[in-house]
Image (cartoon, helix red, strand yellow):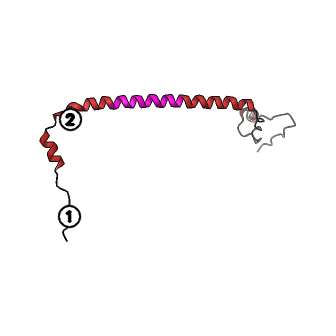
Amino acid sequence: MREQPIPQSGESVATDGADRSSSGHGDPSPCPRPAAFDPSRMIGIIRRKAMIKELAAAYHAECLASCQELLELQKKWDEPYIELKPQEEKRKEASRPPKRRKKSR
């Protein structure tokens, strides 16, 4: 194996023709520290959250309206078929005997 040179301060070592410091892969240094808390950013976050809630409510209302419209269309589509069913068949369906007989004691 070939020994790799130890980088001096402020110097990065390229291996196999690729610069590891720019790619970010294999770099053992920890992630940068998070920025200090900035209250002005919270205002933007709150506004975006409110906008998302408004959009979700509008989408939900539109979805409910579409579902209601589809339900009405389905009912109108099914009406002629329900009326064509003979009355006798309805009575037969209603007076079916139970599948199991009750045991007498």
Mark before the other along the chain sequence, 2 or 1:
2
Q: Secondary structure at mark 1?
A: loop
Residue 51: x and y, percent?
59, 28
Range drawn in magenta: 55-71
In 3D space, how far apart are the residues under numbered discs 2 and 1 (Cα atoms)? 34 Å
Residue at image mark 2: 82
Residue 18: x and y, percent?
73, 32
Circle 2 crowding by C-alpha within 10 Å: few under 14, some 14–19, many from 20: few
Q: Is residue 67 magenta?
A: yes
Circle 1 crowding by C-alpha within 10 Å: few under 14, some 14–19, many from 20: few
Q: Quadrant of the N terminus?
A: top right
Residue type for callout 1? Lys
Residue 78: x and y, percent?
25, 32
Q: What mark, if any, has residue 102 been given in the picture?
A: 1
Compared across the picture, whether 7 is left or right of 46 comes to: right
Question: Do labels 2 and 1 touch, CB within 8 Å?
Answer: no
Above-or-below relation of 80 to 90: above
Residue 86, picture quadrant: top left
Q: Nearer the viewer, residue 71 or 34?
A: 71
